[in-house]
Image (cartoon, rainbow, N blue to C red):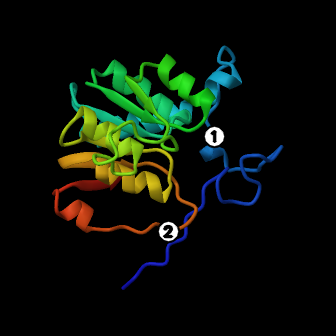
């Protein structure tokens, strides 16, 4: 029997979301910020916690090559954690110039704008500059692709960029359901997971 459980989260899909001036919540959902911690620093707790959880549950081990799809707060936190945990090469995708600079500053080996044309010869190009860059560096693909963007294109890119027996890890919240071609997973025995 199918379950019709509907979940809501403060600041995401409840009345009075994250941009409200005030929001009434249960005290059990509050974490007090110590006086010596600024609100700017405290705001980093959530993306850092999500990134930490991703590295722990994805099966990541030191030396693996990874692709991070999106250099927002969670993608950048993930980049820093993976770098500190001994990742091999870290590739990041991003379209925003500010976030591209941040990804480079935090140690990305390569930042790829998915809207730019591929640098491969026309006969070798897949028409996806990220997939081309990944397979240009790693013939079979990266070990893990982390989707922190939540777009159809990033899911498809993650699946196409991961080596056989690799992992696509989704942390993004999607505004609408995405399409999934299961053949992209089955043929390469790839794993799609989330957390």
Identify the residue shown where x is 60% and y is 55%: 9
Numbered marks: total: 2
Q: Which mark is residue 149?
A: none
Q: Is residue 128 above or below residue 92?
A: below
Secondary element under disc 2, as helix, strand or loop, is: loop
Identify the residue shown where x is 23% and y is 41%: 141
Left or right of 165: which side holds 88?
Answer: right
- Quadrant location, the N terminus: bottom left
Identify the residue shown where x is 37% and y is 40%: 54
Q: Is residue 174 above or below residue 20?
A: below
Left or right of 52: which side holds 149?
Answer: right
Circle 1 Cα neighbour tier, 10 Å, few/some/many (<14 / 14–19 / ≥20): few
Q: Determine the residue located farthest toward the top in the rendered image.
A: 36
Q: Position of residue 40 (x, y in %)?
A: 68, 24
Q: Looking at the image, do the residues carrying marks 2 and 1 touch, with CB atoms under 8 Å apart?
A: no
Secondary element under disc 1, as helix, strand or loop, is: loop
Circle 2 Cα neighbour tier, 10 Å, few/some/many (<14 / 14–19 / ≥20): few
Cα distance in 3D space between marks 2 and 1? 31 Å
Question: Which residue corresponds to mark 2?
Answer: 177
């Amino acid at each position: 029997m199918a379950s019709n459980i509907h979940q809501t989260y403060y600041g995401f899909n409840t009345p009075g979301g994250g941009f409200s001036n005030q929001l009434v919540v249960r005290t059990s959902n509050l974490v007090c910020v110590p006086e010596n911690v600024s609100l700017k620093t405290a705001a980093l707790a959530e993306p850092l916690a999500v990134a930490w959880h991703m590295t722990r549950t994805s099966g990541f081990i030191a030396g693996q090559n990874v692709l991070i799809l999106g250099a927002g707060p969670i993608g950048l936190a993930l980049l820093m954690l993976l770098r500190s945990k001994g990742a091999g090469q870290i590739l990041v995708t991003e379209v925003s110039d500010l976030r591209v600079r941040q990804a480079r500053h935090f140690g990305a080996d390569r930042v790829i704008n998915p809207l730019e044309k591929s640098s491969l010869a026309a006969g070798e190009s897949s028409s996806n500059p990220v997939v081309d860059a990944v397979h240009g560096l790693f013939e079979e693909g990266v070990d893990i692709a982390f989707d922190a963007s939540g777009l159809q294109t990033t899911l498809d890119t993650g699946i196409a960029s991961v080596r056989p027996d690799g992992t696509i890890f989704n942390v993004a919240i999607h505004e609408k359901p995405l399409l999934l071609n299961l053949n992209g997973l089955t043929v390469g025995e790839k794993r799609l997971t989330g957390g």
